[in-house]
Amino acid sequence: MLKQIMWILWPSFIAAGIGVGIIFTLIDPMELVVLGDRVHVSRTAIYSLGFFVLWTVAAIASAMSCFLATGSDTFRQH
Amino acid sequence: MNKIIPIIAATATSSASFETSADENALYEIHKKIYPRAVSGWFAKWRWVLVFATQLVYYGTPWLMWNDRQAVLFDLAARKFYIFGIVFWPQDFIYLTILLLISAFSLFLFTAVAGRLWCGYACPQTVYTEIFLWIERKIEGDFSAQKKLDQAPVSARKLSLKAAKHGVWIALSLWTGFTLVAYFTPVRELGSSIVQMTISGWEIFWILFYGLATYGNAGWLREQVCKYMCPYARFQGAMFDRDTLVITYDERRGEPRGARGRKVDYKAKGLGDCVDCNICVQVCPTGIDIRDGQQYECIGCTACIDGCNQVMDKMGYPRGLIRYATLNSVNEYFGWHEMLKRIFRPRVLFYTVLLWAIIIATGISLWHRAPLKVDVIRDRGAMSREVEGGLIENVYRLHLMNTQEKSQRLAVHATGIEGLQIAGLALPLEIGAAASKTITLNVRVDPEKLPKGTTPIEFRIVAVDLQGNESPENFVIHEKATFFSR
């Protein structure tokens, strides 16, 4: 179980780090318009929140990969 | 292509077959805690030198000052990176990419020459594990004392030792987290904001987050990070070849292994040099037996070399039963000379040339970096309009970024159409050290002189002195734009 958690959280952590780096280098969070309104929090908050949103999304992808990969092994054996 | 595929009736699988089989359970063995035995020797000494060096850089860098500011500061809030004398803007993203390229090629080069040098000596995972193990040894005693303590029933002594160990680990982890955040928020500001309890929520959060990561990875997960989380451990094989220096057990010399007395003529008994003392296994932080051959779990920490050499000394055998060697050298009995000669093989030369080419090109590009970055953006509103005096006006936004750490005086001129002028612009413009500025340019021209449609124009940005005169040694930047007629 611990291994699966590591396999899901770690690659998604790296992916989120790269993603947040690229996105916020190209886009200044202060110029973001979210749901029709300028954001009213600090850049640090946007970077941090952006990182966690990306991490969650990437973790979902990792979890699905993990699930599908283990599943296929189970079927191949039977 | 008339292949007949036989169809065999199969009974429906019961739900039981979806449960994990015994085979699968074997793949996911229960993790056993590894108690690595402490080791001393030539390589262990070097590993500690590297621990001190890397941590001196990591913990020390935020305290360095440069031009009255923190020397290395990734000021995310202001979107500026300061690295000693250079200020990087988001527009300098390319340098970050280059830095990653340089790191990757350095890793390839080191790996091709001497295997997992990075892992054994410089990787934060190894370095912090080393520090945490040292703390654990100082508090709980050596590996056998630690094992005994873990197996002992709960007692006041056990609880206090455990509390002391975790307390020191957590304190060090928090300091590590604080240092990380100090790369993004000036360390003195951060320190005083903690003392005065005015620290922002996100800063506390990241200190705790990185602190927890350090504590978890170096205190609990340890070798499992290398075994299950590290991608480098898996693809290192692609960079290895038979001339890569790796930690090798000299099987021909060592086997058949066996216990024997010091004075015994073991060769007459048909034994090899390995006394089967298991020291190499006991010191291994990933819990492998190097005598089974090269394994992906081996992080190249060289603890087994030091351990084995000590035993060889005691036995009066030559050192190096386990040593840095290439597969070719062990199999074909190369000497050091031949082994070193083979370092200069095409793969290594290719990585070296590429690495230096990138480093030199980057150095040149940084040296010749423009002291000012300029962007001209057309106003998103009206394309053109008529203003007083019957002139046609186009509006532009001029975005200036001073990449130098001293303020600059600038003049801006527009050229490309006869009589083109910038209205209401007070010259010279003053732009502070490492600052950015956006200026609105109302560019006007007599419609008589203006061709139909679009006309390319050019802004000329030039550095000037106090009197507004252009000094010849200063820079001139040209930015292209388009002028619309009515």
Image: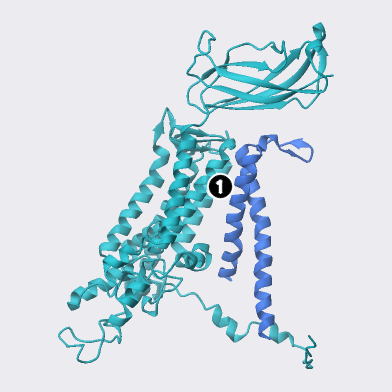
Which of B180 and B242 lies nearest the eye of the viewer?
A: B242
Quadrant for residue B285, please give it.
bottom left
Q: Position of residue B176 (x, y in %)?
A: 44, 49
Q: Where is residue A61 in the image (x, y as percent from the top left)?
A: 68, 61
**Observer able to see residue B123:** no
- Label 1 Cα crowd, 10 Å radius (few <14 / some 14-19 / many 20+): some
Q: Which chain is cyan in the rendering? A: B
> Considering the numbered disc 1 on the image, is that residue within a helix, a strand or a loop?
helix
The residue sitting at 84% across, 19% down in the picture is: B486
Q: Name the residue under label 1.
A: B205
Q: Which amino acid does label 1 sit on?
A: Phe
Q: Position of residue B323 (x, y in %)?
A: 30, 70
Which of B62 and B252 lies nearest the eye of the viewer?
A: B252
Q: Which chain is blue in the rendering? A: A
**Observer able to see residue B139:** yes
Q: Position of residue A24 (x, y in %)?
A: 63, 42
Which of B380 and A21 lies nearest the eye of the viewer?
A: B380
